[in-house]
Amino acid sequence: MKWEAVEPQRGTYNWAPADELVDFAKENGQLVRGHTLVWHSQLPAWLNNGDFTADELREILHKYITDQVTHFKGRIWQWDVVNEAFNDDGTLRDSIWLQKLGPGYIADAFRWAHRADPEAKLFINDYNIEGVNAKSTALYNLVAQLRKEHVPVHGVGIQGHLDVRYSAPHDIATDMKRFDDLGLETAITEADVRIPMPADNTELEAQAEAYDVLLRGCLLTEHCTDFTVWGFTDKYSWVPGVFTGEGAANILDENYKAKAAYNAMSQDLTLAAGRDRKRT
C-alpha cells in the first residue's frame, strides 16, 4: 500500500497486490492495518522528480489519500496515516511534505483520510518512541494539540524496531500511558529485535527480553489494541538488507522453529488471558 507500489505512474493505480492481501484477510477473519498514506520514503519517481508548487503538491496528496482510503473503505481496521514524521531530537523531519506544505500537512492528512472512511481508526506511526525521550515527547505534544483542534487522530503506532546491543525500553508502559490518558489508542506496529550475526544464546535471550518488554508494555496499557510483528521468520526478514552484519530479528528462525522470543511472548499472552478470565 506504499505510494510507489500503488501509483507507479501518475494517475494510474495498481491495486491488485494490496487487494489480494485484503481479500485474503477477509476470507480468514483477519483485521488489516493499512500502511502507509504519508511517508517521506518509497514515493514514486514521478513525485520525487516533479517540480510541483505547494498548491499542486497539496492537491496531489489530497487526491492520493482520498483515492487510496476510498478504494479500501470498510476493509481497513487501522490506517498509518502519517509515518515517521519526526527526527530523533523531536524536530519534524525535513521531508518533501514539510518543505512544501508546512507542518499543517499532518492535520490535513488525518482530516482527508477520515472523510474518505469515517469508520477506520487513524494512527500516527513512528520508531524510537518506545520509551520516554525527546522524540516520543514531541509526538505526544503534537497529538495533544491535534486532539484539542478536533483533528481525527485515533491512535499512536509505536514501531518497536529494537537492537539487542541497546537496553530494552523498560519505561514503555509509562510512555504508552501518556497517550492512553489523552484518550488515544496505542499499538506496537512493527516489532522486531535485530542481533549482530552470528547470534549466540545470550543474544537470543536478550532478544526474548526485548520482545517481552514490548508486549508487556502493550498488555499493561488499557487501550493498546494490537501487537504486530514485522515479519515472523528470519528467512524473509528485511534486517540483513538494511543493517549490515545484523539479522535473526524475528520470533521464528529461518527454519520456522520457535525462538526464545516466541516462547516469552506466548507465556505473556497466556498469563494475560488467565488474568482477564479472573476479572470476568
Image: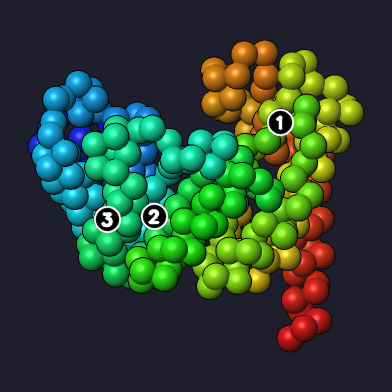
According to the image, label 1 marks what residue?
163
Please tell me whether mark 3 sits on a helix, a strand or a loop: helix
Quick check: 137 left or right of 117? Answer: right
Residue 127 coordinates in the image, percent (x, y):
56, 41
Residue named by callout 3: 108
Which residue is at 39% across, 55% downward?
Answer: 79
Q: Nearer the viewer, residue 152 or 95?
A: 95
Q: Which residue is mark 2?
A: 79
Residue nearest the viewer, comparing 141 with 84: 141
Q: CA distance from mark 3 to mark 2?
A: 15 Å
Question: Depth check: 120 or 129 in front?
Answer: 129
Q: Secondary structure at mark 2?
A: strand
What amino acid type should be assigned to the residue bearing mark 3? Asp
The quadrant of the picture occupied by the C terminus is: bottom right
Marks 2 and 1 sit apart, C-alpha to C-alpha, by 26 Å
Residue 194's place in the image compared with 150, above or below, is: above
Q: In the rendered structure, which disc, 3 or 2, sits on the residue that comes first in sequence?
A: 2
